[in-house]
Image (cartoon, grey):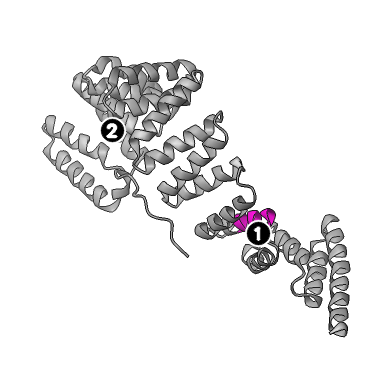
Amino acid sequence: MTTVLLAVALLQAAADQLAARALEAAQAGDAVSAEKLWKEALGRAPNHHASLFNLGVMLHRQRRSADAVPLLDRAATLQPRYEVHLIRGQNFQHLERREEAIRAWLAALRFQPANVKLMQVVSLEYSKGRYFHEAASMARQALRSAPNDINLYLISIKALQDAGNQDTASLLAAEAAAKFPDSARAQFEAGFHLQKRGATEKALAHLQRAMALDANYEEPYYFYGDLLVRQSKYAESIEPLQKAIAIRPGYAPARVSLARALSNLDRVPEALIELESATIVDPKNAQPWVLLSQLYFRLGEEAKAENAKQTSLRLRREFPSVLEAPQARPFPAR
């Protein structure tokens, strides 16, 4: 037994020396030599943690992500630490293996449970995978740790909205607007959720505040103008909708709303221009074609009206997700 332990210790010492030389080579920019030395160290001691971790990190940074996976996984098994799980998550993210990235980051959070930045990353990654309930839970956890971070408020509001928890999202948006009175985004979120709940006048006040705070933020202009259109205040809606489009020419919903206002003011040629532009900037959206069909029919151009109607039906079939909110799904068990 003593002989075996001595042999293992000698191999470990040899691996330590090789790993130290590899790290020096890597720091000097000689990645080829570093890789060779780390692999030699692992040949001597297959469970040499420093070699597994450092070689895995180097391969990850070289975007050789698939080669890095087994090295980092073994390193995490041998010595589960925050750093190795963090890098594993980033590496899986490069490979677009979202669920494995999230699991690695959750493992990292067990070592640093108050790491707000990592919680934010995990929440956003949950959202990208349509795991909206998990995204909302993680965002709220981060917000409890950093209650004065406006970005966490905004992430939480969006996650709650996507998860279908509109009531809590609305309450949080109102809280954010009160807490951050000089934030255009916070004022917009409050206005957005108020208009969804039918509190039009309060919504308009928040949207006006958002526009005053940031003249280059297009969404408040669009929602303000669109609310006016829904109130049949067509003339008043023109300026804010045009402002939204000037800021963001590809804003198709603003063009559709502006077309509605123009058509109701009997400015049909201008409405047609807006709708035709909307079909160009957002070719998958059926909505401009619906209104085009109505306007063509109104002008007596029945062939154009029928063509626009059929185009709208085709786009609805081919791109249903454009008009439908993405549905939440549960995060998969292992």
Stretch of the chain drawn in magenta:
81-91
| Residue behind mark 1 | 63
| Residue behind mark 2 | 275
- Name the residue located 54 percent from the left edge and 31 percent from the top edge: 147
Amino acid at dot 1: Arg
Of the pair 309 and 75, the residue shown nearer to us: 75
In the image: residue 144, left or right of residue 64: left
- CA gap, disc 2 and disc 1: 44 Å
Give how far across and how far down residue 197 sits, in percent.
28, 28
Give how far across and how far down residue 21 sits, in percent.
88, 64
Judge whether residue 166 is colored magenta. Answer: no
> Which label is found at residue 324?
none
| Vertical order, 192 against 159 (above or below) | above
Amino acid at dot 2: Leu
Magenta segment main secondary structure: helix
Give how far across and how far down residue 145 sits, in percent.
57, 37
Quarter of the image with the N terminus is bottom right
Ranked by sequence position, the earlier of labels 2 and 1 is: 1
Quarter of the view holding residue 48: bottom right
Give how far across and how far down residue 281 sits, in percent.
37, 38
Q: Residues within 10 Å of mark 2 (few under 14, many from 20)?
A: many
Of the pair 169 and 91, the residue shown nearer to us: 169
Quarter of the view holding residue 68: bottom right
- Name the residue located 61 percent from the left edge and 42 percent from the top edge: 114
- Name the residue located 32 percent from the left edge and 21 percent from the top edge: 225
- Name the residue located 85 percent from the left edge and 61 percent from the top edge: 25
Looking at the rendered structure, the secondary structure element under dot 2 is helix
